[in-house]
Amino acid sequence: MSKEEAKKYAMNIVKSIPEVLEKGAKGTDHLGRVFVDYGNKRVGLNNEWKNEKLENHWVISSYELYDTEKQALRSTPQAITKEKTFNSLNSVEPNHTTKN
């Protein structure tokens, strides 16, 4: 995926957030995080960041959900490692967003 395609894809996900929140079904995961699912999209809402409660702020995440069986058939080790700049699982750089 090119940089321009990735940007367009990300913006489409962002633009879908209002529809997901309006039409979706609310749920809570095993860690107590709230999410809303609609179609193949999920919006996650959390009022904590790095184990600290956020006052009047929310962290919002949005992404597509994939059928894991179909995804497993499409994924190969070559596909996973080919685009290391897009796949954090293959990052050789330290993750500056986590504590050591």
Image (tube, rainbow, N blue to C red):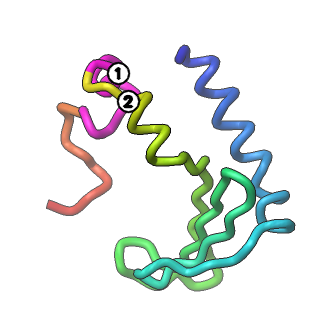
Q: Is residue 44 above or below residue 11?
A: below
> Residue drawn 61% across and 71% down?
35
Residue under label 1, please give it: 79
Secondary structure under badge 1? helix
Residue type (three-letter) at the residue carrying disc 1: Ala
- The answer to whether 45 appears left or right of 39 in the picture is left
> Exactly how many numbered labels are in the figure?
2
Q: Nearer the viewer, mark 2 or mark 1?
A: 2
Magenta span of residues: 78-90
- From the image, give the main secondary structure of the stretch colored magenta: helix
- The answer to whether 84 appears left or right of 6 in the picture is left
- The answer to whether 52 appears left or right of 65 in the picture is left
Residue type (three-letter) at the residue carrying disc 2: Ser
Dividing the image into 4 quarters, which one contains the C terminus? bottom left
Q: Is residue 18 above or below residue 74?
A: below
> Residue drawn 55% across and 14% down?
2
Where in the figure is residue 74, as x and y percent of width and height? 44, 28
Where in the figure is residue 34, as x and y percent of width and height? 58, 78
Marks 2 and 1 close (CB-CB < 8 Å): yes
Where in the figure is residue 6, as x and y percent of width and height? 59, 26
Dot label at residue 93 = none
Distance, label 2 to label 1, CA atoms, is: 6 Å
Where in the figure is residue 83, as x and y percent of width and height? 35, 20
The residue lying toward the viewer, choosing from 99 and 14, is 14
Residue under label 2, please give it: 75
Q: Is residue 21 above or below residue 73?
A: below
Q: Is residue 85 magenta?
A: yes
The residue lying toward the viewer, choosing from 35 and 48, is 35
